[in-house]
Amino acid sequence: MNQNKVLVSIIIPVYNTEDYLKECLDSLINQTLKNIEIICINDGSTDNSFQIIEDYSQDSRVKIINKKNEGQSIARNKGVKEASGEYIAFVDSDDYIDLNAYEVMYNFAKKNDNEMVLCDVERFNSIKNWRAKLHRVSIPKNEEITSTNILEMPTLIYDTGPWNKLIKKSFWDENGFSFMDGRLYEDLLLSSQLHCAAKSVGIIPQVKYYWRSREGDNKSTTQHTTRIKNLRDRVFIANKLSELYHSNPKYNPLLKFHYKKCFEYDFLMFINKVSMASEDFQKELVIQIAPLLENLDFSDMNLIVLDKFKYQLIKENDIETLKKITIYAQKCAGKGRSFRYLCLLANALKDNILISLLGFYRLEKSQRR
């Protein structure tokens, strides 16, 4: 093997992550796979991020692109254009990876001729580590899969991040992939486009990528689930994904998995924060979600009755009751199911919405018979 050949180009958009950037870069320059390039796109940072990158550029494999702030999508797309590796990978500058991650993934991809290889992901904050629902569903635990694709394994719809992947550069170029500019959650669309195009995806069940959940005031942009733009963009991307799965008859079977994910996961993260949001956000929630509920069949979805009730309240534009229900649920979080429902009923009785809740429960139960 040519010792100068770049095997993996690692693309890192950087914007004001001085508190986490060293941990990220340390995990990259110390990779056991040495034939890599680390492309850092400083997207107009106003903190010390650029100075930190400059310090690491003493390693000749670190390349810096310094530009005005235009957003993560443009930064990632620019990084791809500069990439010379046989494979590309994306890392967020507040995360980090195992030191042997790219050696393991590269060797796996070469052995099995995969267009893309996935690894498992672990979320973390200052208190704990946990496996996110997205990866509990999409990455089988302790099961190595040498080759599959989204048509064989539709749960890959839940594999929505670009950063747990090693992607063959020629595959990327042949399909003309790029991140959509100007939208949050654009990586959900790109990940599904990758999966729809890939004939061979390899899955490594070991955790190799560590995805930070920021705390306090320094949260990432997509963690702000009470902002109107976040809500609008999440629904916009969901609709784009619906168009993708409608675009080709062979993708049509994926639609039910897509809707299941949207209503069990994507939209609830906004709905469950409605009591903390502004009045404008609450109105926008109805505007964005209510049209999606027309003629929707929840029978294939693993929604609990309480979550179905939340969607019914959105259809009825009953935000006040929705706020109360989400508050009850938050108060009882972490308790046993029986305790949660007793707590819910007690609060519903106190706030004079018990009849509405029980009425919905009886209706839903009769429809399941």
Image: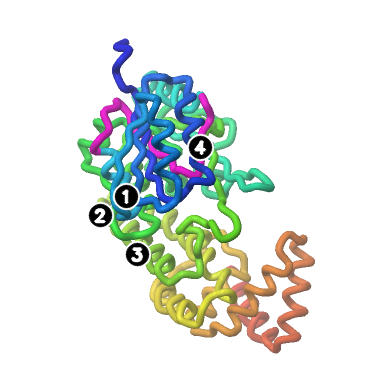
Callout 2 amino acid: Ser
Question: What residue sits right under mark 4 in the picture?
Answer: 22
Residue drawn at point x = 72 percent, y = 74 percent: 344
Q: Which residues lie in the magenta part?
A: 81-99
In the rendered structure, does residue 359 fall within the stretch colored magenta? no
Circles 2 and 1 in contact, beta carbons < 8 Å: yes
Graded by Cα atoms within 10 Å as few (under 14), some (14 to 19) or many (20 or more), the crowding at tag 4 reads: many
Q: Using the image as rendered, state which of residue 295 and residue 13 is in the foreground.
A: 13
Disc 3 versus disc 1: nearer the observer? 3
Q: Nearer the viewer, residue 211 or 141?
A: 211
Look at the picture and state if 78 lies above or below 341: above
Residue 71 placed where, x, y %?
33, 54
Residue situated in front as seen by the camera: 111 or 55? 55
Residue placed under numbered mark 1 in the picture: 251
Q: Earlier in the sequence, mark 4 or mark 2?
A: 4
Q: Residue at x 39, y 35 (%)?
A: 54
